[in-house]
Image (cartoon, grey):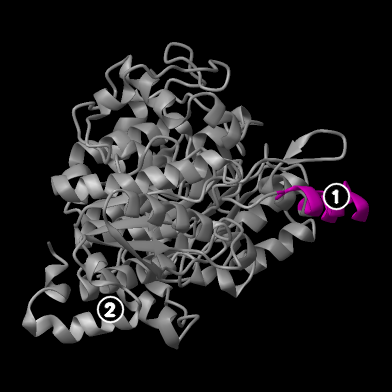
Amino acid sequence: MRSDNVTKGVERAPNRSLFYALGYTKEELERPLIGVVCSQNEIVPGHMNLDKIAEAVKAGVRMAGGTPIEFPAIAVCDGIAMGHTGMKYSLVTRELIADSTEAMAMAHQFDGLVMIPNCDKNVPGLLMAAARVNIPTIFVSGGPMLAGRMNDGRRTCLSHMFEAVGSHYAGKLDDAGLEEYENNACPTCGSCSGMYTANSMNCLTEAIGMALRGNGTIPAVMSQRLRLAKHAGMQVMELVRQDLKPRDIMTVAAFRNAETVDMALGCSTNTMLHLPAIAHECGVELDLDQSNQISSRTPNLCHLAPAGDTYMEDLDRAGGVYAVMKELTKKDLLDTSVLTVTGKTVAENLAGVENLDPQLIRPIDNPYSPDGGIAVLKGSLAPDGCVVKRSAVAPEMMVHTGPARVFDSEDEAIAAIYAGQIVAGDVVVIRFEGPKGGPGMREMLNPTSAIAGIGLDKSVALITDGRFSGATRGASIGHVSPEAALGGPIAFVEEGDTIAIDIPACQIDLLVDEATLAARKAAWTCPPPKVTTGYLKRYAALVTSAARGAVLE
């Protein structure tokens, strides 16, 4: 066993003495040592219950003959970090999580790992670590939050909460109405209840083969979630026996499957950052053009919040991720021969699976749209690409041309929106918020929610080299690459310039002649960095383009 490096032989007597100091017995050290990576903390609603998941995992490991050993991973709550400097520290934790987990797993020579994430950066960060360490590993998340319920019976969620702030500023919602949303939007523990980034990534962990069925959809408050965790603990022991590793599972074909399911589900645009980053750790390079090719042949089958009025608990009742995958196999859109952590192929996993609610998971012959939920746009404004959640865009905004309203930070833009300075037809441009320029590539949920809350989501577009929360809806186009801090065309946009957006054609252009743009570029100097100390300074120096997943080099 790999753990023999720390438990066996005369020369390892000092190592064993330290295990004995922890209370482990000789018998426990003779079993496979399984690292249980738990992201539990008391600041993230999606993580407050993970101690219970960890205990269930450890029970499963022990039942199957292993010795579980828990250690932590950090987590940021994007909702609490939203709208202030804290959001600069969200995406960057992905690399911290991957690095620290790699360090712990290598230093202590575990035979296998069970990863227990739940929210936005923990899932991809731990998948990246799993690929690096490449020992038998399985994932089990904490599960999604239940949808909230307003006093009149309407269901609600976090995206409604953010939009309620915009409605309040616009005079459409009074103080009591705002407080009602506050008290009802987030009623339980778990990752926020719509198809936001956390739930997107937990669903894709099933699709890529690294988690058992139900990982992405079983609600956090259900006892079924604890049973799933016990089964994950048992299954990691089987993976150790088979020596089935993450890179055996996360192959090129598996990533194509994940992107296909992504398009069918209508996942968060942040998946276009995370999947390439995970693939990079596996030695697989994903590019945005490939994503568009997959999108072009993959029907969009689900409209969960914020694209619609259904939630993760509804998707679970309809059959979950496997039911979506089953629909996709009817048109041979998945490679069903790939292996998964079940020890079986996708085809074997899907045997007998049914779509239990064709209204929620549209049949493959009756989709919401013939193409996927995410589109990559390219053109003179974004030569290397940008990303939009097409499934959450109103039909009247699929093609839009309007004057640019230019802001060099999210804070400037949100102030203008709340002050009523943005009008129908405008194209709001927020720049210097990319991976390097931010630094940290903040999510723009506040400005997009403000636009929706004041009733302009069907007449105003927002474009940024930053990114968007999975809770964002509307013509919100992020990840513009190259970013402004690297001298991309978005840096040269001026107030009143015309920008043309054609989402069906995957095109985005700045309608300014080349001579004018060349003159602007020649006169341009990059503003000084916004952060000059600490981790963000190091991150800005090492991070690559959003088009490459914002990986560090």
Residue closest to the eye, 489 or 109: 109
The secondary structure that dominates the magenta segment is helix
Q: Secondary structure at mark 1?
A: helix
Residue 105's spot in the image, x, y percent? 26, 68
Q: Is residue 179 above or below residue 104?
A: above
Q: Which mark is first along the chain, 2 or 1?
A: 2
The residue at which mark 1 appears reads as: 180
Residue 534's spot in the image, x, y percent? 43, 86
* Stretch of the chain drawn in magenta: 166-187
Image-based side of 485 in relation to 100, left or right: right
Q: Is residue 349 above or below residue 513?
A: above
Q: Residue at x 58, y 57 (%)?
A: 444
The furthest residue to the top = 365
User: Which circle marks residue 19 in the picture?
Assistant: 2
Q: Is residue 377 above or below residue 354?
A: below
Image-based side of 500 in relation to 460, left or right: left
Amino acid residing under circle 2: Phe
Graded by Cα atoms within 10 Å as few (under 14), some (14 to 19) or many (20 or more), the crowding at tag 1 reads some
Quarter of the image with the N terminus in it = bottom left
Q: Residue at x 72, y 62 (%)?
A: 416
> How far is disc 1 from disc 2 in space, using C-alphas?
52 Å
